Image (cartoon, rainbow, N blue to C red):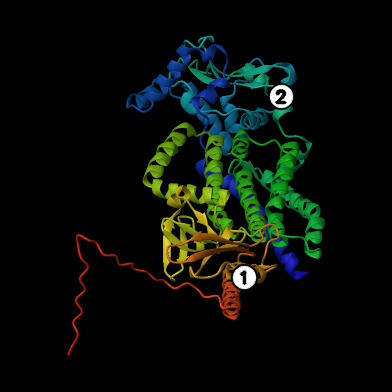
Amino acid sequence: MSSIMRRLNFSLLLSIALALCLVFANNAFGQQPTLKKIMEKTSKKEKTEEVKKKVKEESKKEKTPEAAKAKLLGPEDEYNRGVPRTSVEGFLEAAEKRNYKLAAEYLDFRQLPRWMRKFKESKLAHQLKIVLDRTLWIDPELLSIEPEGYKDDGLPPYRDLVGQIKTPEKTVNILLQRVPRKDGVFIWKFSNKTVAEIPHLYDYFGYGPFEEALSRFFPDVQIFHLQLYQWIAGLFFIALAYLVSVVLTWPALLIIRRKEVPYRDQFERLTTPIRFLITLILARNWLEYYISLSITAKAMMEAKTVLTIITVWLIIRLSGLVVVFLSDKFEKSGQKASKVLLRPMNNIFKILVIITAFILWMDNIGFDVTALLAGLGVGGIAVALAAQGLIKNIFGTVVILLDKPFQVGQRIKVKGYDGFVEEIGLRSTKLRLLNGHQATISNDQMEKAEIENVGRRPYIRRVTNIAIPYNTPLKKIEKALNIIKKILENHEGMDPERPPKVYFNEFNEASLNIIMIYWYQPPKYWDFLAFSENVNKQIMEEFEKEGIEFALPSQTTYLAQDKTKPLHIDINRDS
């Protein structure tokens, strides 16, 4: 029981660590929205080519020494509200420090409807910050640094557009307006038209009852773009979701452990990533339902860092189960050589899964993966050219294992070699030759070579010629034929469809020939040799009884005298 609790605590801590990785990974590697994404949130008029050009020019200006001078063009102001950019930066900075009384100095409260008098100025500033955090990504660098703002953006000259927020009822423009200060100097503030829309926007994007209660109970502290109460609620949802995942998977785990389920260990290894996947799905849905996250936090969640990690983890565990299943299947079907490819192919598959997941993750956080894919393509071509020999051998191995021209343990004849297949590797095949030597042939050559698979013969055929002298009478020849046929009748290892054949078939130069053919099965070579030895002994024994001789190699020379060339034989004898 204690071991179970330890595993439970470890898994719970790991799930919390993965959730923290979501924040840290995105905070470290996340990318701000591109100009295209920001322009999509602006009005249709601002999407004209002129405005885009103006934004681009203003962004470039800030990188030059003139940018510092441009900030001096605005009037001096204790809150730095002389130009649109610094005014927005001042509001955001004050709100980040939770100084909402100071943040209210950047809002125009003139000529508001009477019903809004019940709202405190600091509270409206706080609500605007909450709405902006949850709906609009503001990049101050895209705002004007001129005291007059943008003049050609299709808006009145005294207004600039920060962005747009859509509600089910309407689209609200977040506007800056150039207004007179008490001393008559013009400065920039969030327009009173925008301020009047804050309660409407807050109804849709502000705190719900659950959040309102938590925000009152916990201090207003923000950590990595999340409020303290959001962290606490998130960790609570994660812990609760993990307990639910344990409850959902526990019955299946009990069945796997108590029953003799095939591949039990592999199925148990799938439990942890499945639990984390369930935890992530439940916790995310609960967070989205009960808590409205900031646009930064939403962007982090859109990166799907933790989901990507868990998915890759689960796929790799599943691939391990498939490898064990196929390995066992190959083992039972006698295809042991096919197991050679499983491990390297599984490693290649894992690498491809990780690379694919990384590219998708990079795309989710806003990076342009086109260049990355192009680089991988070029790099892949270079690697393929450098390793083309290895790749050829790997493909040769695949062809051999799929076509199965031979298997480990079988005797084959290939490229002048005769021996038993000892190993089918990823690059080459090793043969143990009949003389005991080992030969190694690349699989690229093996795939192309003509292979004689001796090990797959269904039987062993013997063809033997038995020679008897020319002076053997016909009756003895017939007797010899009958003797051999009787010895081979219903012999050991005989296939009824292939009975033995014995014929007096040839007149040789120095003998009469009897051909003997028989088939032996199963094709066990040493058993075949023992049987052949026994046949030979019986033939010799029976031939000896009947007085039938075997022809010996001999040559007869006939001498004749030619009248033109008298035969002269000189025999010298010692006296």
Quadrant for the C terminus, please: bottom left
Cα distance between the residues tagged 1 and 2: 122 Å
Residue type for callout 1: Lys
Residue type for callout 2: Pro
Secondary structure of the residue carrying tag 2 is: helix
Q: Badge 2 is on which residue?
A: 199
Secondary structure of the residue carrying tag 1 is: helix
Image position, residue 549 (x, y; %): 52, 75
Q: Which mark is residue 491?
A: none
Q: Badge 1 is on which residue?
A: 479
Image position, residue 343 (x, y; %): 55, 56
Q: Is residue 310 left or right of residue 416?
A: right
Q: Is residue 424 visible?
A: no
- Count residues near mark 1 (Cα–Cα under 10 Å), then give few for <14, some for 14-19, many for 20+: some
Locate residue 134: give its quadrant: top right
Instruction: Name the mark nearer the viewer: 1 or 2.
Output: 1
Image position, residue 561 (x, y; %): 26, 64
Camera-side residue of 477 and 343: 477
Relative to 453, residue 379 above or below? above
Camera-side residue of 67 and 570: 570
Give the residue displayed 73% in from the left and 20% down from the top: 168
Q: Is residue 65 visible?
A: yes
Camera-side residue of 279 and 175: 279
- Count residues near mark 2 (Cα–Cα under 10 Å), then give few for <14, some for 14-19, many for 20+: some
For the view shown, which residue lies furthest in the front direction? Answer: 563
Give the residue displayed 69% in from the left and 24% down from the top: 201
Relative to 408, residue 301 above or below? above
Return the disc, 1 or 2, that comes first in the chain's sequence: 2
Q: Count all numbered tags in the image, as a single digit.
A: 2
